[in-house]
Amino acid sequence: MLGELISLSVAISWTATALFADVASRRLGSLGLNVVRMGLSLLLLALTLWLTLGTPLPPMTNGGTWLWLCLSGFVGYVLGDYCLFQCYVLIGARFGQLLMTLSAPSAAITAWLLLGERLSTMAVVAGLVTLTGIAMSILSRKDGVGKLQLKLPMRGVLLGIGAGMGQGIGLVLSKVGMGCYTESLHDCGISDPSSWTAPDALLPIPVGVMMPFASTMIRAIVGLLGFVVAITLLNKQARIKLRQGAHDATARWCALGATLFGPFIGVSLSLMATLYTHAGIAQTIMAMTPVFILLPSWLLFRQRVTWMEVVGAMVSVVGVSLFFL
């Protein structure tokens, strides 16, 4: 039950971060927002690790841990989050989160290629159901007749697809990295990470519980470096927009909200959820974000939500759940 409750908290957290990021990305730009949220999340994670493990950096790691989690950070944060927040600018958080359900088939295919996990017939069916749900939401007929066509900008849809793939692939890479982290703890003489606590920590919490936060920090370090390089060398306009947004109180508060509920709470709890329940159950519950976000999108942004979009979001979530039957 604990794992399921954590997964539900993740879905709610990701709904909140999507709403905050929708506003902040339009005011700061996607690159600017990512620089801010990665920097803030590193400070929060460093403080958390120092209080609970006695060190601001992930303790007792090995080369394999850093290699796989750095790869995960690059794919999931630098590539995936850039696509996601740019997608928010073009098509909004509601459709962006819907396209994020593609993370499940992306993770299944990556696990098949990288880890040799079995890709069953049901997984193929699940992928098709997920795609059907997405299509129901983003396709329409003009005036109710004629051929189906995209009702969203193509570039926004492609960025949303990239975001979903980045999260799915990044999740598998994180799984490999956390496996290496567990081996490293064992090599350091910690046979039971779920009970070992750091003797010099102010608020000692077992290292096994804090391992997802330590893993998230490694990913966030790569994310911050990647976005700083991108905004410094590649995009002058993004730097200008970030400086302008620094004087915008709404942008600052929304960036803080996107940070707290995203890379700090949401991502860390998503990794923790897989430790306390089956990954399939966790992923299915966490995939409820496209459904959860519909009501606040209507209440806060007055976005028109059609019944077909509601059904499409539910079908896509059903498709995600089928991956784990």
Image: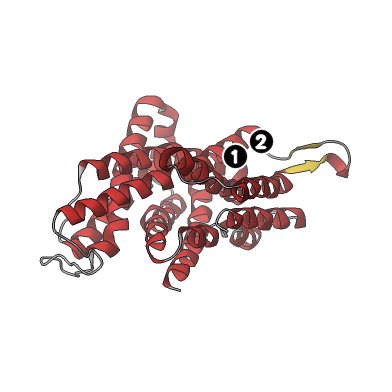
Q: Residue 28: x percent and y percent? A: 45, 42
Instruction: Tell me, for residue 153, which label it has, or none.
Output: 2
Q: Which amino acid does label 1 sit on?
A: Leu
Q: Residue 298: x percent and y percent? A: 66, 59
Instruction: Tell me, for residue 76, which label it has, or none.
Output: none
Q: Mark 1 points at which residue?
A: 90
Q: Distance between the residues labelled 1 and 2?
A: 7 Å
Q: In this view, does 123 lie to the left or right of 259?
A: right
- In the image, residue 28 sits, relative to residue 193, either above or below, namely above
Q: Is residue 263 left or right of residue 88?
A: left
- In the image, residue 289 sits, relative to residue 225, either above or below, namely below
Q: In this view, does 191 lie to the left or right of 219?
A: left
**Quadrant of the image occupied by residue 79:** top left
Q: Are marks 1 and 2 in contact (CB under 8 Å)?
A: yes
Query: Looking at the image, which residue is at 65% across and 48% down?
Result: 125
Of helix, strand and loop, which one carries label 1? Answer: helix
Q: Which amino acid does label 2 sit on?
A: Pro
Give the residue furthest to the right: 145
